[in-house]
Image (cartoon, rainbow, N blue to C red):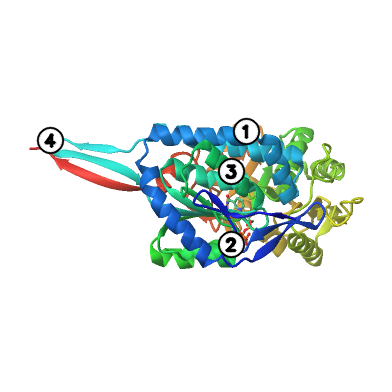
Amino acid sequence: MEFIENFIDGKYLAPATGQYLDNVNPSTGQVYAKIPRSGDQDLSLAVAAAKRAFPIWSGMSVNERSAILLRLAAGIEARMDEFVVAESRDNGKPEKLAAHVDIPRAVSNFHFFATAIEHFSSESHYMEGIGINFTTRKPIGIVGCISPWNLPLYLFSWKIAPALAAGNCVIAKPSEITPYTASLLGQIATEAGLPAGVLNVLHGTGPEIGNAIVAHPSIKAISFTGGTATGEQIARIAAPMFKKLSLELGGKNPTLIFPDVDIEQTVKEVFRSSFSNQGQICLCGSRILVHEKIYDAFKTAFVRWVESAIVSYPSDPKAQIGAVVSKGHMDKILGYIELAKEEGGRILTGGVRVHLEAPYQDGYYLAPTVIEGLPNTCRTNQEEIFGPVVSLMAFSSEEQALDWANDTKYGLAASVWTKDLNVAHRMADRLEMGIVWVNSWLVRDLRTPFGGMKDSGVGREGGWEALRFFTEPKNIFIKHE
Ligand code: NDP
């Protein structure tokens, strides 16, 4: 049995309580490691270390900080295979996906912010004949970064990289379900020359160590990605303490398909936008709205394509769909499939657990599922399922598609499929989403603002948005004589 430890002050430490939690491999359903059940004492150690490290790290030149973060990116890249296997063992995703998406994008996050900080500038405003305003942007101090299990290192690094680049010290908590790659990062950080105490990684549960990080008075900003209900709890604690808050929350994203598309091509793209990472990407489209003129043709081709998808164990190079992340999450998804049937939905394909052969017979595999016949207002079409389950609906006009697309409490992302540039512009303009992709999905440019409207979040990550979040602006006015 492997023991993962906290990374505090540049050292791997056992939790003060001596208590550990099970870490399960979702592809087999077996416990394979133990992680610390951290509490207040571990947090106090991390805060003390971060306080000592802050003057050192924030006092370094931007060039020095950038060089260390570039070495950190190179350190992950040099151990790519190890990170890929670790990520997919923790999460259940196909290794192929971790090798093409998760780990390379974590490398890119460090690379991007290591170089972005060298170009980050603050504003100045000249007042003719009166004086000049200029704004300084300094690191905040100690910041808390809390990330989810679906894209573990990718989303962990998406927060940590800008926080560190801006000169902050970080206390980070990965999801207790997927702690492994965040733990490996400690080794890489040390080898890259990151001073002890600049990055501290604490493991444990959300309600315990996650909550303690949010409530700690010395932690001045919280960057959180996770569910909307958790985001609400975090805001309740952090807002009255006047902490800076970045909340990237859930979604119920629409995929809008207009009648002029190439159906065969669109089916392949929509398969990817629906079922990548077993549908466990906040940006996956789960409500597929298809124009009535092509509804039957699209449905037939889509269901055929989904039925042919290979559900298999993560190291199988042919696997298109791996295991979902946990037994609890699998049961939740199966519960939603039952709900869909009760609400009058017809299961066109999937809807069941898949049992692979030994040693994967107890893994958490689900057949990708397509449902039709549900109104947009039902719970299946309104609540985030976050699994390989999509619902097909036929619309008759642009207006109707737009009404349905916008009619949820969420506003994270949408994809629009059409060859008509006017339709694309009209929809993109009126969709109440933080991100709209036209004839594409999950094309990422790290310079762009990333995040959602409505209950999908507060604030944006990415590019200058992230560097602004992780710095405190001060405007200084100098009067002319
Ligand atoms: P959770 O909200 O359950 O957890 C997210 C993180 O918060 C985990 O590290 C969790 O710890 C921690 N946490 C849980 N409770 C608390 C608490 N009271 N105080 C502080 N921290 C807490 O989300 P999931 O991990 O289940 O992730 C799935 C959700 O994330 C989905 O809703 C998805 O849409 C959303 N998401 C949003 C993205 C976006 O950019 N908008 C991107 C990716 C995912 P632990 O796991 O140990 O409980």
Q: Earlier in the sequence, mark 2 or mark 3?
A: 2
* Quadrant in which the C terminus appears: top left
371 left or right, relative to 36: right
Q: Mark 1 against mark 2, which lies toward the viewer?
A: 2
Q: Mark 3 against mark 4, which lies toward the viewer?
A: 3
Query: Any atom of ligand 1 within 8 Å of the CB at mark 1?
Result: no
Q: Nearer the viewer, residue 403 or 126?
A: 126
Q: Residue 307, how many percent across, how many down?
A: 87, 45
153 left or right, relative to 391: left
- State the SS at label 4: loop
What is the quadrant of residue 125 in the picture? top left
Q: CA distance from mark 4 to mark 2?
A: 61 Å
Q: Mark 3 against mark 1, which lies toward the viewer?
A: 3
**Which mark is drawn over residue 187?**
3
What is the quadrant of residue 467 in the picture? top left
Q: Amino acid at mark 3?
A: Gln
Up the image or down, 262 lies above or below 85; here it is above
- Name the residue that disc number 2 marks: 15
Q: Earlier in the sequence, mark 1 or mark 2?
A: 2
Q: CA distance from mark 4 to mark 1?
A: 53 Å
Q: Amino acid at mark 4?
A: Gly
Q: Amino acid at mark 1?
A: Glu
* Label pair 3/1, CB-CB below 8 angstroms: no
- Name the residue that disc number 1 marks: 77
Q: CA distance from mark 1 to mark 2?
A: 29 Å
Quadrant of picture, ligand 1: bottom right
